[in-house]
Image (cartoon, rainbow, N blue to C red):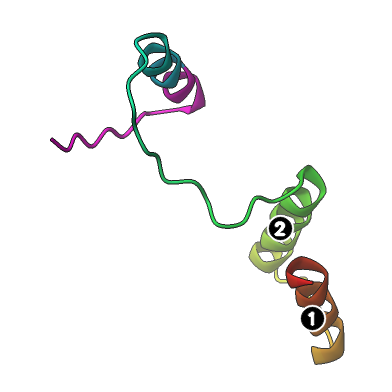
Amino acid sequence: MTVVVHPHNEQEEKVLLAFLNSLNYEYSSEQPEVELTAQQQQEILAREQKLKDGTTTTRSWDDIKKDFDNVYH
């Protein structure tokens, strides 16, 4: 049997998982492939705001590659 549930927020997800765990149900859930730190989340939000404000600056390709190296190595 397959049941798909789309919780509306993190609290609903926690309650659902607690319920399933309390009854010892076996289940699987999709987890994000990459979890961002709070600092990374803030940087993304700041860059998004700069884009909306039209104040973005360009970054060198080498700088971008360094960011990827930090994530994947």
The N terminus - image quarter? top left
Q: How crowded is mark 2: few (under 14 residues within 10 Å), some or many (20 or more)?
A: few
> Which quarter of the rendering shows the C terminus?
bottom right
Q: How far apart are marks 2 and 1 (CA)?
A: 14 Å
Residue found 50% across the figure and 27% down from its top: 10
Task: Please report the bounds of the magenta region as a residue range.
Answer: 1-14
Indicate left or right for 41 with 25 as reference.
right
* Prevailing secondary structure of the magenta residues: loop
Residue, far left: 1
Q: Is residue 44 left or right of residue 34?
A: right
User: Mark 2 vs mark 1: which is more N-terminal?
Assistant: 2
Is the residue marked by circle 1 packed among few (<14), some (14-19), or many (20+) residues within 10 Å?
Answer: few
Q: Could you tell me which secondary element the residue under label 2 belongs to? A: helix
Residue behind mark 2: 44
On the image, the x and y values in percent for residue 2 come to 17, 38
State the mark number for residue 64: 1
Name the residue: 80% across, 90% down.
61
Compared to 58, does 47 lie above or below? above
Whether residue 58 can be seen here:
no
